[in-house]
Amino acid sequence: MADSGSRPTFSLSGFLSLQTETGVADDDEDDEDETSIEDEGYFQMLLEKEIDRSHIQSRVDDWIISARSEAIQWIINTRAFFRLRFSTAYLSVTYIDRFLSKGLIDSDKHWVIRLLSVACLSLAAKMENRIAPALSNYPTDVYNFESSVILRMELLVLTALDWRMHSITPFDFIHCFISCFCAEYSKRHFVSQTTQILFATIKDTKIMGHRSSTVAMAATLMAMDQNLTRESLEIKLKTTRLNWLFDHENVYTCYSQMLELKPLEVNVSRPDLAKSFENPTVGAKRKRLAFDECEKSANR
C-alpha cells in the first residue's frame, strides 16, 4: 500500500513512558464497569447516546483554540497532581468543547477559559469519583478564583449543557472492544495501554472530532499493532461481531492520526502549574465583572 510507505516511525513504549513516570499509568485499569461483548443491550445504548462531535471545533475563534490548548495542559497537570482517572480528565474536555461550541465566549478572555477548565474538571470529578477535590484545592495560581466563583461557573456550564453531564466517551467502550481481540490473561495489559493512548488524544481536535466508538476502536487497534495498513485493519474488524458498526475508513483515518501523536508532557508541581496560563495581569475585580457578562450571555 502507498500509505504504509509514508507512515511515521512510532514507538509505543516511548509514547507511554512519560505517563508511566508519573506513577499514575494504571489508574483506570481496575474499573469495575467492564462491559462484555455479550451485553448487546448496554452496548447499543452507548452507541445511541454517543454524540457526533465533528462540529465541535468548527464554531470557535483562533484565540479560543489556543486558550483551549493551554486549558487542557492545565487539566493534564492537575489530573496528575490529584491522581484523578484519565477518563475524568477526558470527560472534562468534552464539557469544555460542548460549552465552547455554544458560542458563549465572544471576546479574547483567556481567564474565562481557565475558569471554565476548573469548573469542567471539578464537574467531571464529581461525576466519576466518590470524593472529589475541594474547590479551594484546585491550583488556579494568579487568577485566585474563589470557590463561590467556580461554583457559579459550574452552574453556568450545567445550564448551557442542559444538565446532560453523562457524556459517552471512548473510555466507555474499552473493555468491550478489547474483549473482541484479547484473551482474558492479556486483557489488563491492553486496557492500560489503550487508556493511555486515549488520554494522549485529549489535545488533538481532529481526533476528538470523531465519534467516541471510532476513537476507542482505533486506540484499541493501535495498542495491539502500530503497523496496520488499511487492508489489515479491515481484516481485523471483520473478524469481530462489531464489524457492522464501523465505517472502516473513519477508523483507519483516526488510527493514522493517532500514530502522529506525541507524548504528553506532565508536570505535577504547583509552581509549574502556575505557569501554564497566560495573561497574569488580570485583576480580581475585572474578572468578576467579566464573568457576570459571560453569565448573562448564556442566559439569553
Image (tube, rainbow, N blue to C red):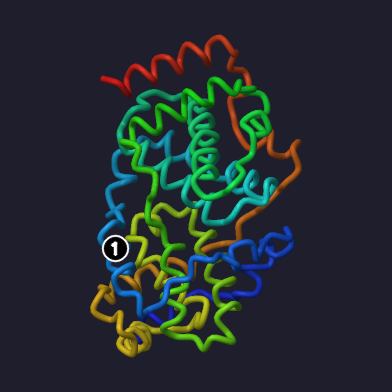
The quadrant where residue 131 appears: top right
Q: Can you give x and y, in whole percent of width and height, for residue 185 in the image? A: 59, 87
Is residue 171 toward the left or the right of residue 279 in the image?
Answer: left
Q: How many labels does the image show?
A: 1
Does residue 44 lie above or below 116 as drawn? below
Residue at (41, 68) in percent of width and height: 173
Does residue 168 lie above or below 150 as drawn? below
Does residue 127 lie above or below 243 as drawn? above
The quadrant where residue 101 appears: top left
Quadrant of image for the C terminus = top left
Residue at (26, 74) in percent of width and height: 245
Mark 1: amino acid: Met
Q: Which of 19 and 43 is in front in this view?
A: 43
Residue at (60, 78) in percent of width and height: 189
Q: Can you give x and y, in whole percent of width and height, for residue 148 in the image? A: 55, 20
Badge 1 density bin: few <14, some 14–19, many ≥20, Cα 10 Å: few
Q: Can you give x and y, in whole percent of width and height, for residue 170 in the image? A: 42, 62
**Tag 1 residue:** 45
Element class at badge 1: helix
Q: Nearer the viewer, residue 39 or 242?
A: 39
Q: Can you give x and y, in whole percent of width and height, for residue 38 in the image? A: 35, 80
Quadrant of image for the N terminus = bottom left
Is residue 12 toward the left or the right of residue 202 in the image?
Answer: right
Residue at (52, 29) in percent of width and height: 115
